[in-house]
Image (cartoon, rainbow, N blue to C red):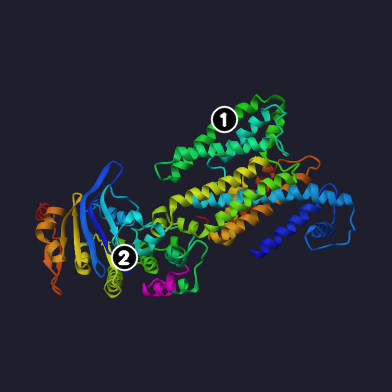
Amino acid sequence: MVGMGVALIFIILLATSIGSVSIPVGTTASILADKLPGIDILQTWSDTSATIVLDIRLPRVILAGLVGAALAIAGATYQGLFRNPLADPYLIGVAQGASLGAVIGFLMPMAWNVAAFGAIPIFAFIGAIVSTTIVYLLARRGKTLPVTTLILAGVALSALLSSVVSYLVIFSGSKLHSIIFWLMGSFSGAQWSEVLVVLPYVVVGTTIIIIFARMLNVMQLDEEQAQQLGVNVETLKIILLAAATLITAASVSFVGTIGFVGIIIPHTVRLIWGADHRYLLPLSIMTGAIFMILTDLISRTVMAPTEIPIGVITAICGAPFFLYLLRRRTKAIF
Amino acid sequence: MKTELEMRQVTLGYGHYTVMKDVTFKASPGEMVGLIGPNGSGKSTIIKALSRLLNPRKGKVMVGGREIGTIGRRELACLVGVVPQLPLLPSTFTAFEIVLMGRNPHLKLFQTESKHDWDLTRTTMKKTGTEKLANRYVNELSGGEIQSLLIARVLVQETKAILLDEPTANLDIGRQGEILDLIKNLCHGENLTVLAAVHDLNLAAQYCDRLILIHEGRIYSQGTPSEVITDKNIKEVYGAENCVYTHPANGLPTVLLSAHANMKNNRHM
């Protein structure tokens, strides 16, 4: 786990150095270290380099890391909670809700710039929360929340919402291109203000989920046995669903619905390190962050200055690696 | 603290379907009580109600003199442990990890298993003959091995009362004896309350101090094995005639089937 932490820091440095203006890794490290409290390094770099590193690249790299971490741990949580390897963070309507919200946002008059980052994320976030709340209310039976009903309600509502999205996209006229790009996900133009909004959700959400990691292990037995072993199954489901859904909603609202990460990263971690949630969850966070930073690096450098949508890169790079792991698998996934 | 299990005029059911009515019984510490009855008579339903997986429609379900609904899940899991009927276990855990989960109710939210928990798990696995399975993944184990693991898990849970749902259904005759001896010794030695749904009438008669016979959604008879397992009761409840004998070694009732007279005639035709 420490190794993964070191790797994550190194990847952040590397990704911050690479770009249209190449800055040596050593210089990047110095610029970043200089900003840390208590460290003062003699300035050997130009102010432009500092601006590129600190205001353009670093927020983007950090946002990518946060979103990767959020989607990976949310995916691991859903898979554990539903005891279903096909579960991903978008299973109960987050993505389609966010998409619909975002598309409505795009179709609104441009004057709606309520916050530093524009209106789209706010619309997307509201869409995600409203749609998952509807799914939750539909699936609820008295005091219990049957998992199968929840999944089916999520799938059905997602289908409904995505057809509405398709309809709106077709008739979106001149905004078609930007909507499609948003839907495929992108970190371009990431700002510190976005990082600061996403960060608290991800920190609080992941902390809550990790606290309940042992309970999530017991939940793997089945709900009846978990109750007989002292787990308050219904309460746990609501807490974990709320935490995972909020971090997913916060992430997709800013960067669009990036697929693949949430389902594949947790499985990759299971294949390499095993399925105990006390390791699975923290390792998913780090693996997800590293994977997302690397894929974002690829998406902005390979065809520079054109950016490839990140959703395309995640699957192109991730799928072959995952299939390779699956073939030489040593550990059971489910 | 002693934990007795009690039901007072309890009605149990699922949705609109009523499984049992007017169930009243008590199981006390140091006593091994067997639930017997035909398939689908409601043995497992009683076990579910006593572990609060099912709320009673009417009447009171009591654990240690308190109504079960007033006891929190975690506290209840420290009082009452359950061996479920052959569940599917996730293939990603080793046998040791499954048994260690028995410590879950004793751990607070931020606690992790201590050395004590690990040692207890190890010694219990030795006691139940499951220590050689410790590092195996549970999807590789046989039904009997899983059943032994679940018994180890309930012992690790260190509860004052244990509910068992068909604890020996998948065990061979040697293991059946071992496991039931172990449970009976604990019951009498440590003063545990044991309530077991047992399919096999002979095992029930041999090992239980008291039996509760369930028939058509009600308690048909309860008492010592000799009082409950009689020719009349077995005929009424199971429809099998004249099959209760006396065990040659200890005088307890024994049920032996003989091939039916009509069947014999048919074969000779």
Asked if B189 appears above or below A72 in the picture, the reply is below
Task: Tell me what residue is drawn at x 40 percent, y 71 percent.
Answer: B130
Task: State the image quarter where residue B185 is shown.
Answer: bottom left
Residue marked by disc 2: B161
Residue marked by disc 1: A163
The percent position of residue B32, horizontal first and vertical second, equals 24, 67
Asked if A10 appears above or below B130 in the picture, the reply is above
Q: How many marks?
A: 2
C-alpha distance separating marks 1 and 2: 55 Å
The percent position of residue B187, horizontal first and vertical second, equals 28, 71
Judge by depth and name the residue closer to the eye, B170 or A297: A297
Magenta includes A317? Answer: no
Q: Is residue A330 at least partly visible in the picture?
A: no
Q: Is residue B51 left or right of residue A288?
A: left
Question: Which residues are the magenta region?
Answer: B120-135
Asked if A119 appears above or below A62 in the picture, the reply is above
As helix, strand or loop, the secondary structure at mark 2 comes to: strand
What chain letter is assigned to the residue under label 2? B
**Identity of the amino acid at label 2?**
Ala
Q: Is residue A58 left or right of residue B15?
A: right
